[in-house]
């Protein structure tokens, strides 16, 4: 069994990580992965601590009797104002036949339950994503569609996405600037702070920072430490891609409104000359 850290840290460079509330089940899962493959990145450590069996989110830790509360637990006015904005958006879109509302990280369903009540009468498909088994069980009692956490943002998505206090809960990686002046090069001499094992303790392990991670890291003074929110950045990239596809479709629709009759000038069309790219290098149209 891996015991949770007790007592003073062994050293400044390999100090034990204090996690007094971590379950033995989670500690064993993390230790097993470290033994199998060596030190792990902090986002992986955080993911296991939050979502593996026995993890922090195994049962919803939110609500008046839990570890924390968010705005929907304090007063329903939050959902009332949010619903007003959604109704205004629906009206601005011409009152579509179906509104697909996706809540990312829906938790125990408090906000979803309030919004369903506030949006009664709208043609609504309420979709929720949630990794916590306990939260998914709570959400299953509501008239919502529970899907994989990545599914709603796949190609072809159209709808409204909302998330309440999600980004600050997503796993991140840790970087540290060594003492002394910055070094030249793409990594700036940064170190990534991993999690390893020293006997029965979880400890920090410093390793050279990969260039792709260093490119995302904040500017740090010597001896400072920062975080790189890799999971949040990935989510924002997915949202941006979905928005870009929607913008492209809107732009195409508008172009077709301006030029309802057109045809391809096939005589002037040219295929790409390379063997690695399949498609048209030039495809002129005549209006």
Image: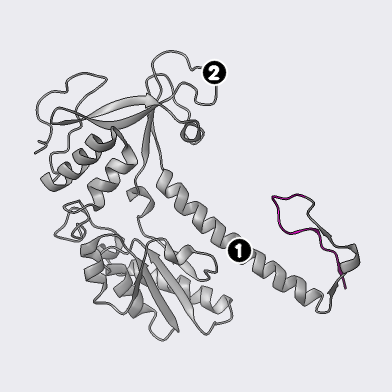
Q: Write down the residue under mark 1.
A: 245
Magenta stretch: residue 282 in it?
yes
Q: Nearer the viewer, residue 4 or 257?
A: 4
Q: Nearer the viewer, residue 205 or 268?
A: 268
Residue furthest to the right:
267
> Residue sitting at 60 percent across and 60 percent down?
244
The correct choice, above or below, for 71 with respect to 82 in the image is above
Work out how far the residue at label 2 is from the one at label 1, CA to CA, in angstroms. Answer: 39 Å
The residue segment tinted magenta is: 274-287
Q: Residue at x 82, y 75 (%)?
A: 259
Q: Which residue is painted at 49% across and 26% down in the image? A: 187
Display colour scheme: one colour
Q: Is residue 193 left or right of residue 133?
A: right
- The 10 Å Cα crowd at callout 2, few under 14, some 14 to 19, many 20 or more, is few
Q: Secondary structure at mark 2?
A: loop
Q: Position of residue 145 (x, y in %)?
A: 35, 75
Q: Residue furthest top?
A: 180
- Between discs 2 and 1, the one toward the N terminus: 2
User: Relative to 260, does residue 183 appear above or below in the rendering?
Assistant: above
Q: Position of residue 149 (x, y in %)?
A: 38, 61
Q: Horizontal placement of 87 versus 136: left or right?
A: right
Magenta span dominant secondary structure: loop
Hey, which quadrant is residue 136 in on the image?
A: bottom left
Please tell me how crowded label 1 is: few (under 14), some (14-19), or many (20+) other residues with Cα within 10 Å: some
Quadrant of the rendering where the N terminus is positioned: top left
- Report the residue that reaches farthest toward the front: 275
Q: Which one is in front, 199 or 145?
A: 199
Identify whether 160 is placed above or below 33. Answer: below
The C terminus - image quarter: bottom right
Residue 203 percent coordinates (x, y): 22, 29
- The residue tagged with tag 1: helix, strand or loop? helix
Pointer 2: what residue? 184
């Amino acid at each position: 069994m891996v015991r949770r850290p007790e007592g003073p840290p062994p050293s400044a460079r390999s100090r034990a990580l204090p996690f007094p509330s971590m379950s033995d089940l989670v500690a064993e899962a993390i230790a097993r992965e470290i033994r199998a493959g060596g030190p792990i990145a902090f986002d992986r450590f955080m993911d296991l601590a939050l979502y593996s069996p026995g993890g922090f989110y195994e049962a919803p830790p939110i609500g008046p009797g839990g570890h924390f509360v968010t705005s929907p637990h304090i007063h329903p006015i939050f959902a009332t104002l949010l619903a007003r904005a959604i109704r205004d958006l629906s009206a601005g879109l011409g009152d579509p036949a179906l509104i697909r509302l996706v809540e990312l990280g829906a938790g125990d369903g408090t906000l979803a339950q309030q919004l369903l009540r506030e949006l009664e009468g709208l043609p609504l498909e309420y979709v929720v994503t949630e990794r916590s088994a306990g939260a998914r069980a709570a959400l299953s009692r509501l008239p919502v569609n529970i899907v994989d956490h990545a599914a709603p943002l796949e190609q072809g998505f159209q709808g409204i996405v909302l998330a309440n206090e999600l980004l600050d809960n997503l796993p991140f990686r840790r970087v540290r600037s060594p003492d002394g002046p910055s070094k030249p090069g793409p990594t700036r001499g940064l170190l990534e702070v991993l999690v390893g094992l020293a006997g029965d303790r979880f400890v920090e392990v410093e390793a050279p920072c990969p260039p792709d991670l260093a490119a995302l890291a904040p500017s740090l003074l010597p001896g400072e430490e920062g975080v790189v929110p890799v999971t949040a950045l990935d989510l924002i990239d997915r949202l941006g891609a979905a928005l870009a596809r929607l913008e492209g479709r809107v732009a195409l629709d508008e172009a077709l409104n301006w030029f309802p009759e057109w045809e391809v000038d096939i005589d002037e069309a040219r295929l790409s000359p390379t063997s690695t790219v399949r498609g048209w290098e030039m495809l002129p149209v005549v209006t």
